[in-house]
């Protein structure tokens, strides 16, 4: 790593008009689905890696080749677990269209890959909050919903197009969504800890500020992804819109973020890393990457409970099928056939059962398709029945007021952890 990675990175960005992001090496937001939500990478990038990020990272569905080319083969850039090889093989058997899946570890890495090689991938599973950047760089094209008949099957529990639209034009089809809750080990907390100031009337931790309490110094876990984590910080301060900060609010946010350093031993690099941190007892409370962290810990006998409706608000994410301009737009028949197939209720029910993601189904759709209550437990589908009481506290990712500034602050924050 160069002596001054931030300076090197931003110099590279200026010279190349590079994407409004920092590429992170292939550690995962939802690793072993493990990545789920919204996105963590483990280390700072050094100069020259933007060009290298066009190299394939096998995502379990075969290596992604170049985009364009034959319309009987498509390449998708996705998240681990979203498109499993048997599912892709089944689609190929039914349609004759081969699908190569490559996984990424963060929204920033996805953007950097597409920026570096705009035609390499045909469909990307773009995260809410990043559509503006892709449109500004002319990397994606609007979605023609008339070519995705199964879009009518997507639950209207929340206005998912708000996250996929830029200036009134829709660029994506919802594939799955989730939120990052406050989680804790109920064998340990409350225990001997005094958390009375942080709990609601039911005694449930309900305040992000619990992470800063001296009692939990060195025992808090968060994951390495500014897209997902940074919005929680303004919410803890009491700022209603965590994505559009004034200069004064940004200074408060930066100070609050840096004050979190002593509470952390490390930043986890993905789903499995954070789950292991909780399973081993290295951390007892934290900002949870994905609900599968909770499921995995519970399977190992560690009772992690979660609050998805923290009163200050909960950052939420969605991942959405999006066509690249130089790839997918050149073979629309094949890519739309795949998007439509993977939006169908049976495909989505399998996604929910297999991975614990919330997919696109309503509660009734899931039950009717044979998803059991137990299988729904790690998802947010049951909570959607609460309607506005649930969705009003979810704040889906948006493009922030100054992405470059936020990324720079995040990397400075990382350098101080464990010091």
Image (cartoon, rainbow, N blue to C red):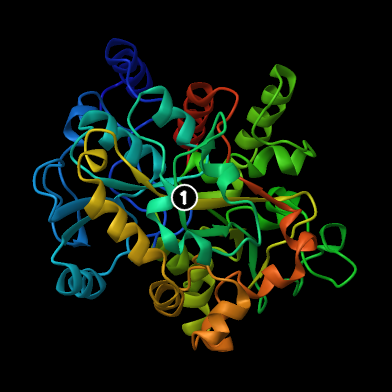
For the point 45% across and 74% down, the residue is 345
Is 279 situated above or below 144? Answer: below
Q: Quadrant of residue 43?
A: top left
Q: Is residue 3 left or right of residue 330?
A: right
Is 363 situated above or below 387? Answer: below
Q: 350 or 235, which lies in front? A: 350
Residue 192 position in % (x across, y down)? 77, 72
Give the residue pinned by disc 1: 266
| On-image quarter of the N terminus | top left
Q: Is residue 162 left or right of residue 14?
A: right
In this view of the protein, can residue 344 be seen by the observer? Answer: yes
- Please tell me how many numbered marks the rendered image carries: 1
Tag 1 secondary structure: strand
Q: Is residue 295 left or right of residue 18?
A: right
Q: Is residue 253 left or right of residue 413?
A: right
Q: 56 or 188, which lies in front? A: 56
Residue 400 position in % (x across, y down)? 58, 30
Residue 289 position in % (x across, y down)? 51, 58
């Amino acid at each position: 790593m160069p002596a001054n990675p931030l300076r090197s990175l931003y110099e590279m960005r200026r010279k190349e008009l590079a994407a409004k992001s920092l590429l992170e090496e292939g550690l995962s937001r939802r690793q072993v689905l493990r990545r789920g939500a919204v996105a963590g990478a483990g280390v700072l990038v050094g100069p020259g890696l933007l060009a290298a990020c066009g190299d394939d990272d096998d995502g379990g569905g075969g290596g992604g080749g170049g985009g364009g080319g034959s319309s009987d083969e498509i390449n998708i850039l996705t998240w681990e677990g979203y498109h499993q090889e048997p599912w892709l093989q089944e689609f190929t058997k039914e349609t004759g269209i081969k699908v190569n899946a490559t996984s990424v570890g963060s929204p920033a890495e996805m953007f950097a890959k597409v920026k570096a090689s705009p035609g390499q991938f045909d469909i990307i599973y773009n995260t809410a909050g990043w559509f503006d950047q892709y449109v500004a760089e002319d990397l994606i094209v609007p979605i023609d919903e008339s070519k995705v008949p199964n879009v009518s099957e997507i639950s209207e529990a929340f206005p998912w197009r708000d996250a996929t639209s830029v200036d009134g034009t829709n660029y994506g089809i919802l594939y799955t969504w989730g939120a990052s809750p406050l989680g804790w080990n109920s064998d340990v907390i409350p225990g001997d800890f005094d958390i009375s100031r942080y709990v609601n009337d039911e005694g449930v931790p309900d305040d992000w500020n619990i992470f800063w309490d001296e009692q939990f110094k060195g025992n808090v876990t968060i994951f390495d992804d500014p897209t997902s984590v940074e919005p929680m910080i303004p919410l803890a301060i009491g700022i209603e819109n965590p994505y559009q900060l004034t200069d004064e609010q940004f200074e408060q946010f930066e100070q609050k973020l840096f004050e979190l350093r002593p509470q952390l031993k490390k930043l986890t690099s993905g789903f499995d890393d954070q789950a292991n941190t909780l399973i081993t007892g290295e951390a007892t409370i934290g900002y949870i990457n994905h609900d599968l962290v909770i499921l995995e810990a519970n399977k190992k006998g560690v009772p992690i409970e979660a609050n998805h409706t923290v009163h200050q608000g909960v950052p939420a994410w969605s991942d959405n099928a999006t066509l690249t301009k130089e790839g997918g737009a050149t073979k629309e028949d094949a890519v739309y056939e795949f998007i439509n197939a993977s939006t169908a209720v049976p495909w989505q029910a399998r996604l929910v059962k297999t991975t614990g993601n919330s997919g696109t189904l309503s509660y009734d759709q899931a039950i009717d398709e044979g998803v059991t209550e137990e299988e729904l437990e790690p998802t947010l589908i049951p909570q959607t029945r609460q309607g506005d009481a649930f969705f009003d506290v979810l704040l889906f990712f948006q493009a922030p007021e100054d992405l470059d500034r936020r990324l720079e602050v995040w990397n400075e924050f990382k350098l101080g952890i464990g010091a």
